[in-house]
Amino acid sequence: MTFDAEFGRHAQYKSLYTKKESLEAIAAQPGANVAVAAVDRSHIIGFAVLSFPHASERWSALGPGTMMEVKAVEVCRRWRSAKVAHGLLRMLLDFPEIEDRIVYMVGYSWTWDLDGSGLTALQYRQMLIRLFEPYGFQEFQTNEPNICLKPENLFMGRIGARVPDKIQKDFKWLRFGVTP
């Protein structure tokens, strides 16, 4: 498989993953999930990545296997109006164990393709909210410094139906830097 040439560097935006080897490496991690949208069965026009947070990240403090991060949902500029991101996100989250986990996404405005989208940062933020809400995500407040750096930055999460009450309570405290 090959990546579309639109993945890469633009004036104000750089794709997170630009080689199939990088997606293969993530997909090989235990529990990780990678969804790919391709045309002609080999030309990647979009991808989404779900994996566990790194041990050094705040979000790993709830214990192994408890939280997972949607690390990327990227679609080539010319395919963005075709609802590819919705399909990728649906595939990414379609597994039974999702109900045992808290899945989150972090939206940093400095990583968004504002030039390619033609949106302002606040419009892009609203677009992300509309993308994630149908899959059970809601916006959560946090004091995580990078998220608090700009008002348009975003933290959303989806709490699975089988996540115990204690973990949900611990997640509430963890969002504000209080380790359970």
Image (spheres, rainbow, N blue to C red):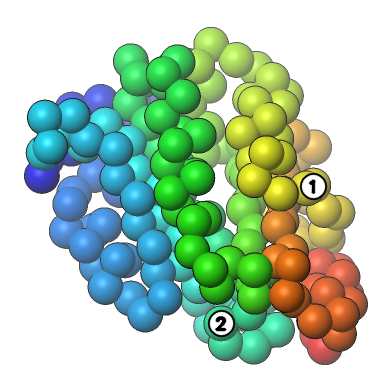
Q: Residue at x 65, y 17 (%)?
A: 120
Count the marks.
2
Q: Indicate whether 24 appears above or below 8.
A: below
Find disc 2 in the rendering and name its residue. Answer: 65
Instruction: Depth check: give the residue in front, 11 or 86.
Output: 86
| CB under 8 Å between discs 2 and 1 | no
Front-lying residue, 101 or 4: 101
Residue at the spot 49% in from the left edge and 64% down from the top edge: 95
Upstream in sequence: badge 2 or badge 1: 2
- To which quarter of the image does residue 7 belong? top left
Amino acid residing under circle 2: Gly
- The kind of secondary structure element at disc 1 is strand
Specify few, some or many for label 2: CA neighbours under 10 Å numbering under 14, 14-19, or 20 or more. some
Residue reaching furthest top? 118
Q: Which mark is residue 68?
A: none
Q: Secondary structure at mark 2?
A: loop
- Give the residue number, with chain letter if any, for mark 1: 139
Q: Check the image and report above or below for 81 versus 73.
A: above
Q: Quadrant of the N terminus?
A: top left
- Image location (x, y in percent) of residue 5: 18, 27
Q: Position of residue 17 (x, y in %)?
A: 30, 48
- Depth check, front residue: 65 or 116: 65
151 lies above or below 142: above
The amino acid on which the numbered mark 1 sits, given as a three-letter code, is Glu
Classify residue 65 by image quadrant: bottom right
